[in-house]
Every structure is written in C-alpha cells, then in structure tokens.
Image (spheres, rainbow, N blue to C red):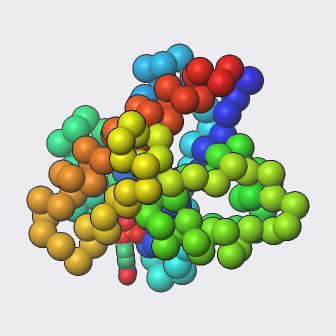
C-alpha cells in the first residue's frame, strides 16, 4: 500500500519543499512506499523553483530540490492525499478553513510527529538570515523521521 503525504507551508518555496525532500529520503530509508508532494496556502510563487537558500541547504545535505515547482493547495488535495502536514499553526488553520466538509485527508502539524515538540512551528526562514535554513532543515528532518516512523507503525 502506498501512503500519500502533502506538506504545506505559506509560499511552497522554503519549508515545504525541504519537508518533501526530507520525507522522501526518510520513507525510502524506512522501506515505505510513498507519494510525496508539497504546496503553499499562498499564490505568490506558483511555478517558481525553491528559494535559492532552500536549494543550497538541501544541496549541502545531499539532496537536489532544484526541479521542484511551487503550487497552491487545492480542494482536491483533501481527497487525493492520506496525510496533509502543515509546517506551522497558521498553515494548519488555513488548511482547516479550506478543507471540504467531506475531506478524507488527515491534517497534522509536522512537529507533532516529534517527541516533545507537539504544537511547535517550523519557523518561516524567508525573511531571516541564511543560517535560518539550517534550522529549517534540522526541523524538517526531525519531523520527517517521526512521521515515517508513525506511518510505518500504523501498517
Ligand atoms: P515558505 O516561506 O512558506 O516556507 O515557502 C515563505 C516564502 C515566501 C513568502 C513567505 C514565506 N512570501 O511572503 O512571499
């Protein structure tokens, strides 16, 4: 059985493409068959590649995300994916507001999947220093590991 997971942040050029890449890696390591994508709640960056700082931190960690392109979350995503995982609490509120009444996807916050970090946000690195992206990477890897373990345990 293939499990599908959509990661959602605001712009889909910093945090959620990194979460997508980290989770694809962790799932492969855990032997899970997964379909993974990411999207933004906002529409400003539709069609754009990830932010160059996000591409750089991924590259430093051995992952190429240059081919990803931003898209906005769609109502159909709430049926197409088993899990929709928000990067921060505002993303989760926006997703809850967008969700069709008969949505089947399970909504969660990424760091809810990390022991002791429930309710925490993956901070938006967009307006900060380049070093913020190293923190983002560490956070999304921790979340991706926790989520992969949870999905593996449920099977
Ligand atoms: P992301 O970061 O949500 O992690 O992709 C942002 C990217 C762009 C903007 C905000 C956050 N923006 O305002 O354009």
57, above or below 53, in the image: above
Residue 148 located left or right of residue 61: right
Residue 150 percent coordinates (x, y): 55, 29
Q: Residue reaching furthest top?
A: 31
Instruction: Kindly indicate the quadrant of the structure image that contains residue 87.
Output: bottom left
Quadrant location, the N terminus: top right
Residue 58 located left or right of residue 80: left
Nearer to the camera, 20 or 124: 124
Q: Can see residue 19? A: no
Residue located 72% across and 58% down the image: 77
Quadrant location, the C terminus: top right
80, above or below 154, in the image: below
Q: Residue reaching furthest right?
A: 102
Residue located 50% across and 30% down the image: 148
Nearer to the camera, 52 or 147: 147
Ligand 1 occupies quarter: bottom left
How many numbered circles does the render carry? 0
Instruction: Kindly indicate the quadrant of the structure image that contains residue 103.
Output: bottom right
Residue 104 percent coordinates (x, y): 80, 51
Residue 86 located left or right of residue 105: left
Nearer to the camera, 24 or 110: 110
Residue located 67% across and 33% down the image: 3
Q: Residue reaching furthest bottom?
A: 44
Q: Can see residue 130? A: yes
Residue 64 percent coordinates (x, y): 33, 43
113, above or below 72, in the image: above
Residue located 21% across and 57% down the image: 133
């Amino acid at each position: 059985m293939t499990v599908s997971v959509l990661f959602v942040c605001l712009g889909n050029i910093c945090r959620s493409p990194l979460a997508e890449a980290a989770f694809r890696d962790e799932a492969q390591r855990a032997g899970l068959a997964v379909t993974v994508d990411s999207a933004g709640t906002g529409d400003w960056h539709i069609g754009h590649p990830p932010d160059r700082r996000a591409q750089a931190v991924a590259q430093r960690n051995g992952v190429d995300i240059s081919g990803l392109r931003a898209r906005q979350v769609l109502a159909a995503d709430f049926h197409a994916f088993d899990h929709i995982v928000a990067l921060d609490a505002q993303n989760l509120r926006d997703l809850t507001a967008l969700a069709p009444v008969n949505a089947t996807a399970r909504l969660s916050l990424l760091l809810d999947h990390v022991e002791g970090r429930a309710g925490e946000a993956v901070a938006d690195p967009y307006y900060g220093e380049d070093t913020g992206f190293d923190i983002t990477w560490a956070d999304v890897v921790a979340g991706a590991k926790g989520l992969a373990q949870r999905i593996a345990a449920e099977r």
